[in-house]
Image (cartoon, rainbow, N blue to C red):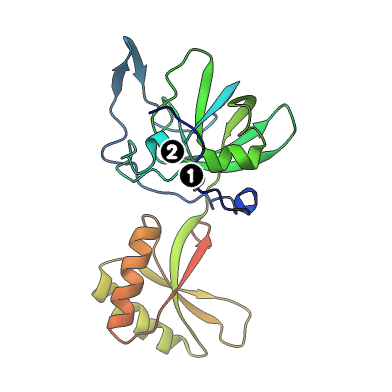
Amino acid sequence: MTDGPPDFIPHDLSRLPDPVPVNEPKSATGNPPSYSVFGKTYYTLDSAAGYEATGLASWYGRKFQGRRTSSGETFDTLKLSAAHPTLPIPSYVEVTNLENGRRMVVRVNDRGPFHEGRIIDLSYAAAVKLGFADKGTARVRVTAVHDLPVLYLQAGAFRRIRDANRLRGTLEQLTGKPARVVRTDDETPYRVRLGPLDGEREAERLQALIAMADHGVPEIYYGEARD
C-alpha cells in the first residue's frame, strides 16, 4: 500500500489548534539509548534543549493510520504530530516552512524519517497547516520549544485560608500528589493547586478520582513550577 492523504479530509483541517507544549515524562518505549534502521545507528538525545536544525520535512498519512507510534500511542494522520530520529519522545518543536513562512508547534511522538536529508516527518494534518501537503516535502527549520509550562489541577478557590488548607490536605491524602495553597488578588484569593502532574492523561485520571470523591471537577491549569 502506497502512502497518501486520508480517505476523508475535514474541510477545516488547516485550522486545527497547535498542541499546547507541557512537560511530560519520557516514553518508556520510545527512548532507547540507540537503535538502527537500514544499517544506520541513531543515538537519542537526553534533552531537546537547544535543538535547532534546517532541512527537508516530509509527511506520512493513511499507510500508517492506526499503527503504533514509538511512544506506544496510536498514529492519527488527522492530528498534529511528528516523527524525529533522535529527539526525546515526547517533545515539542516549532516547525517553520521556509518556503512560505508558515509556522506551527507539533508534538514529537514517533521515530523517523529515515531518508537522507530529511529531518522531520509530520502527520498529514501538520503538512496541511504548513502548506506543503500537496508537494510531499518542504524545506523547514525545526526548533525545540523551551520553558514549557507545568500542568496542575486547580481544585478550589476560597475566601478563608483554613478552608483551602483543609481541601489541600484531603487531596494530598486522596491522590498521593503534592498540593499547595496559592494566594491571588481575587475575591476568593486562596487557590488549591494539585501538582505538578505528568501530563494530561494523569490530570484526567485525577479529575475523575476527585470528582468521584465529591470534591467537584478541578480545572486543568498551566503555570510555572512555583506559579
Q: Name the one closer to the observer, 211 or 197.
A: 211
Give the percent coordinates (x, y) of residue 222. 52, 61
Q: Residue at x 53, y 14 (%)?
A: 117
Distance (Cα) linking label 1 and label 2? 8 Å
In the displayed structure, would residue 168 be above or below residue 221? below
Labels 1 and 2 touching (C-beta < 8 A): yes
Which structural element holds mark 2? Answer: helix
Residue position for label 2: 62
Which structural element holds mark 1? Answer: loop
Give the percent coordinates (x, y) of residue 122. 51, 34
Q: Is residue 31 found left or right of 158 in the rendered image? A: left
Q: Decide: few, some or many residues near mark 2? Use Cα within 10 Å; few <14, some 14-19, many ≥20.
A: many
Q: Is residue 140 visible?
A: yes
Q: Is residue 40 found left or right of 22 in the rendered image? A: left
Q: Name the one closer to the observer, 142 or 185.
A: 142
Between disc 1 and disc 2, the foreground one is 1
Give the percent coordinates (x, y) of residue 154. 46, 73
Q: Is residue 223 found left or right of 66 in the rendered image? A: right
Report the residue that reaches farthest toward the top.
Answer: 39
Q: Name the one closer to the observer, 153 or 127.
A: 127
Residue position for label 1: 7
Q: Residue at x 34, y 44 (%)?
A: 66
Q: Residue at x 67, y 36 (%)?
A: 131
Q: Is residue 145 visible?
A: no
Give the percent coordinates (x, y) of residue 109. 40, 39
